[in-house]
Image (tube, rainbow, N blue to C red):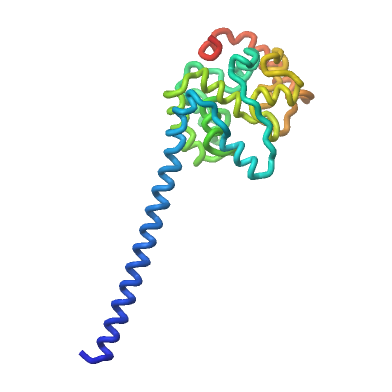
């Protein structure tokens, strides 16, 4: 073989080795990304059992808002330190079948799918909202719903209904950067969550679907009307909240 031919072969070999190294590095990078994604998806399933005994120090929604420059006001209180009026008002307003479903209310899901636009508006349970607040993000998204649904089923399996409600009432946002029933009670009424009246509890429940634009302290006509309906339903809820209050 001529010197020129040998040189060409060497150049070809070097090019092939470089190509293999690039392919190998790309493959390793993709594997790392895949493993990282799997670990990220698995993390909530590892953390949720801990939350059966340990109060969540922060939620994903809080972190998103903090990164957006929204300051956080929060004070955790146990469910025993919240007015039963608030528990009943939130339950009848947000998830009337909370005590009987297993994390997803399939009746409400079917109703939502039977609507004109086929969107899952109104089908979110307290359990689904809890895992969303803890681990996901706000806003309507089918991707989020796909992650939220199995998490809700898992949460209902390993956490008691009482614990789910306790976590929800402590992490849900009641005004911009105001999280939890205690902070909300003091923010709107200058009271503790334990001392909320039936009317105050109903107002807080009425603003939950849109806490940034509704005001529990000075409700507009629509919010006041909704709060009135919630107060009436809560007063006649009977055993609907037994899984939480008994």
Q: Is residue 73 above or below residue 196?
A: below
Residue 217 lies in what quarter of the image?
top right
Residue 174 x, y percent position in the rendering: 67, 28
The answer to whether any part of residue 168 appears in the image is yes
Quadrant location of the N terminus in the rendered image: bottom left
The answer to whether 235 appears left or right of 215 in the picture is: left
Residue 244 x, y percent position in the rendering: 54, 14
Task: Give the residue at the far left of this rendering.
Answer: 1
Residue 241 lies in what quarter of the image?
top right
The answer to whether 233 appears left or right of 148 in the picture is: right
Residue 110 x, y percent position in the rendering: 49, 27
Residue 52 x, y percent position in the rendering: 48, 24
Total residue callouts: 0
The answer to whether 199 appears left or right of 141 in the picture is: right
Residue at 79% from the left image edge and 24% from the top image edge: 218
Q: Nearer the viewer, residue 204 or 40?
A: 40
Residue at 29% from the left image edge and 77% from the top image edge: 13
The answer to whether any part of residue 105 appears in the image is no
Residue at 56% from the left image edge and 11% from the top image edge: 245
Residue 200 lies in what quarter of the image?
top right
Q: Is residue 28 above or below residue 134?
A: below
Residue at 74% from the left image edge and 26% from the top image edge: 187
């Amino acid at each position: 073989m001529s010197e020129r031919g040998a040189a060409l072969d060497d150049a070809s070999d070097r090019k092939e080795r470089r190509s293999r190294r690039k392919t190998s590095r790309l493959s390793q990078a993709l594997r790392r990304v895949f493993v990282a994604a799997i670990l990220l998806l698995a993390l909530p399933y590892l953390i949720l059992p801990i939350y059966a005994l340990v109060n969540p120090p922060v939620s994903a929604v809080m972190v998103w808002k903090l990164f957006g420059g929204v300051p956080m006001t929060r004070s955790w209180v146990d469910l025993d330190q919240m007015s039963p009026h608030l528990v009943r008002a939130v339950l009848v307003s947000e998830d009337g079948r909370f005590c009987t479903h297993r994390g997803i209310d399939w009746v409400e899901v079917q109703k939502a799918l039977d609507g004109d636009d086929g969107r899952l508006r109104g089908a979110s349970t307290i359990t689904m909202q809890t895992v969303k607040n803890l681990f996901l993000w706000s806003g309507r998204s089918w991707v989020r719903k796909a992650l939220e649904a199995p998490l809700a089923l898992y949460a209902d399996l390993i956490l008691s209904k009482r614990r789910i409600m306790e976590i929800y009432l402590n992490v849900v946002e009641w005004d911009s950067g105001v999280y939890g029933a205690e902070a909300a009670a003091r923010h709107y009424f200058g009271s503790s969550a334990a001392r909320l009246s039936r009317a105050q509890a109903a107002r807080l429940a009425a603003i939950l679907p849109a806490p940034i634009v509704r005001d529990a302290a000075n409700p507009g006509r629509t919010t006041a009307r909704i709060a009135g309906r919630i107060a009436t339903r809560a007063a006649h809820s009977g055993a609907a909240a037994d899984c939480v209050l008994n």
